[in-house]
Amino acid sequence: MNVANNVLSSVLEAVGDTPMVGLRRVGVQGAEVALKLEAMNPGGSAKDRIALSLIATAEQEGRLRPGGTIVEATAGNTGIALAMVAAVRGYHALFFVPDKMSVDKIRLLKAYGAEVRVVKDVPREDPENYQNLARIAAEEMDNAAYMGQFELGANPLAHYQTTGPEIWRQAGPALAAFVAGAGTGGTISGVGRYLKEQDPAIQIVGADPVGSIFTGGPFQPFRIEGMGEDYYPSTLDTQVVDRWVAVSDQQAFTMAKRLAREEGLLVGGSTGAMVVVALQIAAQLPPDRMVVALAADTGRNYLSGFFAE
Ligand code: PMP
């Protein structure tokens, strides 16, 4: 209970209902392109939404009890979101992160009080892969729960229940296409399923880094963080995705820089990749239609990365 009317009982109540902003200078051909600014969530990314549902699921299933430890394999944003929720709920947090992850994100995890183990960025078949190490660490600890963002239905469900309806409310029937990148695939699967239920003609398009297997492979390392994989996670529903479009690191980073300088939108490299694809789609559509891309996180995560180049 709060003494005043207009005070949230915790920061977690500020998750969701993020704004959607139309591009004014970067995208001017054909349909309107708008970004859903997930960086406006208190943890700074779309992952705040799934952190709430992953932890709630672990609690309901009895895998996590008071004072327990949250363990996860994360390229950053899920960790930041889980660390925020852990702080509010009084859990410890332990994260396994691949060594390609930006130093900015590792510092953020530590700032929220989490323990971080940086491990080699190796394929999933390798026992030293960050997901395998996180799962085993959780099994070996008492009262510790592996969150499993790459496996749990609670991940796409959070986007089906919150992000999807918000986009439909904000964009409405003009919406012709939705663009997202896929790491776990939770965003594109959950939002895509919801939007297709409202209007099956809405195109669901995946932006994919060159080197990721969703556009055909073979797998090669790439620098864009948070999206693209070397395998198909069970949280990715490929049926929902109409097509995939490959984007290079350079195209993505150049676009992210343009978004900051020309639109005042400080977003990450994955958003740059999505906007490259969204602009291609928009150019083929009339001006009364709309293309929405999900801006997954903030450029502040990459100040010492591609923004410094
Ligand atoms: N962009 C960034 C920056 C991310 O951290 C993520 C999450 N891994 C994504 C895109 C893709 O989201 P999802 O895991 O829901 O596919």
Image (cartoon, helix red, strand yellow):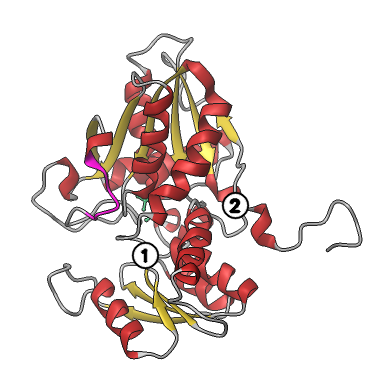
Write the start and end of the magenta stretch as one range: 233-238
| Residue 299 spot, x, y in % from top left | 50, 52
Q: Is 306 situated left or right of 1 in this image?
A: left
| Residue 130 spot, x, y in % from top left | 27, 74
**Magenta span dominant secondary structure:** loop
Q: Is 178 situated left or right of 164 in this image?
A: left
Disc 2 residue type (three-letter) = Asn
Residue that badge 2 annotates: 41
At x 91%, y 62%, the residue is 3
Tell me if mark 1 has few (under 14), some (14-19) or many (20+) residues whose alpha carbon lies within 10 angstroms of its own: many
Residue 22 part of the magenta-drawn span:
no
Quadrant assignment for the C terminus: bottom left
Disc 1 residue type (three-letter) = Ala
Q: Secondary structure at mark 1?
A: loop
Residue that badge 1 annotates: 75
Q: Nearer the viewer, residue 97 or 186?
A: 186
Tell me if mark 2 has few (under 14), some (14-19) or many (20+) residues whose alpha carbon lies within 10 angstroms of its own: many
**Hey, which quadrant is residue 226 in on the image?**
bottom left
Q: Is 66 situated left or right of 239 in this image?
A: right
- Position of residue 266 relative to residue 201, above or below, is below
